[in-house]
Image (cartoon, helix red, strand yellow):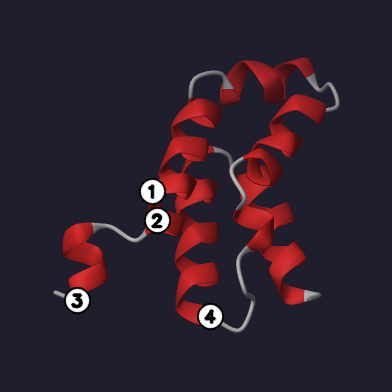
Amino acid sequence: MSQDRKCGNPTDAAARTVAERLRKDTVERQHANQPPPAETDLPRESRLLAVDSDGHRTTRVGTRIVSVGDASIGHLLGYHYLHL
């Protein structure tokens, strides 16, 4: 196991926090079919958008973690990193 996985990478920790917040009401939000402005702000507020896109491991894992909480928001985050 790598050192950053044992101790926790700050980006992974931020992604976990975002995922936990998203997970609480993902199903209800999807069923309501409403725009998610507050949810799309979470990655920005947690500084996940400021992660260096050259750190492929960091961006890939961060995107996967957020996607566990809400696949749609994770998808947006993944596209953000792809287009930097």
The vertical placement of 8 against 30, above or below, is below
* Distance of label 1 from label 2 (alpha carbons): 5 Å
| Residue 17 image-quadrant placement | top left
| The C terminus sits in image quarter | bottom right
Q: 45 or 83: nearer the eye?
A: 45
User: Where does label 3 land, which residue?
Assistant: 2
User: Residue 76: percent from the left, percent from the top?
Assistant: 74, 54
Horizontal and vertical percent position of residue 27: 58, 22
- The label nearer to you, 2 versus 3, is 2
Residue 10: mark: 2
Q: CA distance from mark 4 to mark 2?
A: 13 Å
> Is residue 12 depicted above or below 44 in this figure?
below
Asked whether the residues under the numbered discs 1 and 2 touch, taking CB atoms below 8 Å apart as contact, a structural biologist would say yes
Residue depicted at 74% across the width and 38% down the height = 40
Q: Does 46 sit left or right of 58 as displayed?
A: right
Residue at the image position 81 percent from the left and 75 percent from the top: 83
Looking at the image, residue 68 sits to the left or right of residue 41; the answer is: left
Q: How far apart, in angstroms, are the residues tagged by discs 1 and 3?
A: 15 Å
Residue 36 visible at all: no
Specify the farthest residue to the right: 35
